[in-house]
Image: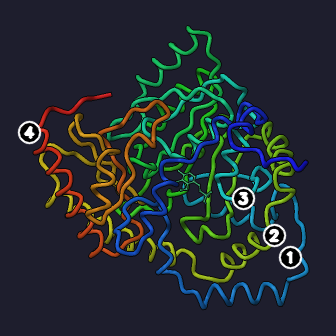
Amino acid sequence: MSKLVPHEENLTARYAERAARMVPSEIRSLFAVASRPEIVSLAGGMPNLSALPMEMMADVVQKLILENGQEALQYGSGQGHPRLREQICEMMALEGIRAKSDDVVITTGSQAALDLITRIFVDPGDVILVEAPSYVGALGVFAQYQSQVVHIAMDDKGLIPAALTEAITKVRAAGGKIKFLYCIPNFQNPSGVTMPASRRTEILDICREAEIFVVEDNPYGLLGFDGPVPNAMRAEDHENVIYLGSFSKTIVPGLRVGWALVPQGVKEKLIIANESSVLCPSNFAQLTISSYLAHEPWRDQIASFCSLYKERRDAMLESLDAHFPASATWTKPKGGFYVWVTLPPEIDTKVLVPRAIAAKVAYVPGTAFYADGFGSWQMRLSYCHPTPERIRKGVAALGNVVKEEIARRGGETPKAVR
Ligand code: PMP
């Protein structure tokens, strides 16, 4: 007799425990709807490649294959290509980082670096300190390694040092093992907030004193459009900071090239973890990026990305001013992709999604960015992808949906704080 294909419920018993935490993110389930052409998607955080000359990319790829195909299409090193690691150090110098290429490990996007670092450090039950709110992709990784996420409150200057100290004391008093602090100091995803230099120093001092690594995730650092961006935290502390970088936002996400700059002691483990995951990061992708950096005006290209995003950021902030109710507040990002909106606390942004979709606009509800269900009256709006006209249309439509909901509930109430 032939065996039946196992259904999901009998498979559950066969899965590892950690599989129970492998659940789709709220963003993923929204993507299918948000990508319909009639919907203005303020949901995804996809880089806008319309400013990238595709003929130039095609030339880079063609030359690479014709001139160096034997290497580009071959396996490579588990640590990543030495030439690209040198170029990464030149790029990080723009953020004040002085590093040796030997301390860089190239990964399949910085997402893989996040996964591998967590794999190296975190046992089930260990604590990871995380900004509130934080990057949904990091929360997914932390969940899968069965960590406990402890959120640390932020203000308009990022992580609040006193809240960090308090959390460390509390977790340790309860016997918790803190493995690292995960933070995104520049144009944070999802809040758009940037930590000023003095705040960075305070956070670094607290973590060094408490012997807690800082994992500094910095994919947006070079996408500032309103004046200088503070130096990376890694620039100030090379022993206690694990720095994650990415070409996804400065060049292209599709090649999946990111990196980690790690203290010497962590490097060997990271290379081994990388090898066990992918053997080696793609030589083709790395050498494409490397040739692009060597031969093309990448600084100018980043400047064109910045002006494209700035125009969209301005369109979004103007439309929020024009169409959102007085009881709503939002961040004013100086770079990156995101604006974080806080509505009156009785408004549930998850409940509003179908109404927003009916009004042809999509966003991500705030709860996606917390591990603990917080944020039900918040939402992330991204301005990176639609045209400024579409952003204006989408924000106006969303403003109406929000105002209708406030009116339906009979008025406005003061905002709650975390
Ligand atoms: N960190 C943050 C804060 C991000 O926003 C993203 C992508 N949206 C990543 C890491 C992952 O980027 P990638 O894997 O493309 O380098």
Q: Ligand 1 shows up in which quadrant of the image?
A: bottom right
Residue of label 2: 283
Mark 2–mark 1 distance (CA, rounded to whole Å): 7 Å
- Which amino acid lies under the numbered mark 4 shown in the image of this protein? Gly
Counting from the top left corner in percent of width and height, residue 316 is at 27, 63
> Whole-Å distance between the Cαs marked 3 and 1?
16 Å
The residue lying at 74 percent from left, 53 percent from top is 104
For label 4, the crowd category at 10 Å Cα-Cα, with few meaning under 14, some 14 to 19 and many 20 or more, is: few
**Residue type at the position of mark 2:** Asn
Task: Look at the numbered disc 3 and give the secondary structure of its residue.
Answer: strand
- Foreground: 82 or 24? 24
Closer mark to the observer between disc 4 and disc 3:
4
Cα distance between the residues tagged 1 and 4: 62 Å
Pointer 2: residues within 10 angstroms few (<14), some, or many (20+)? some
Q: Mark 4 to mark 2: distance in Å?
A: 58 Å
Toward the viewer: 312 or 371? 371
Please tell me the numbered disc located at residue 73: 1
Relative to 73, 243 lies left or right: left
Q: Is mark 3 within 8 Å of ligand 1?
A: yes
User: What numbered label is drawn on residue 108?
Assistant: 3
Residue of label 4: 411
User: CA separation, marks 4 and 3?
Assistant: 49 Å
What amino acid is at disc 3?
Thr
Find residue 295 and report its image quarter. bottom right
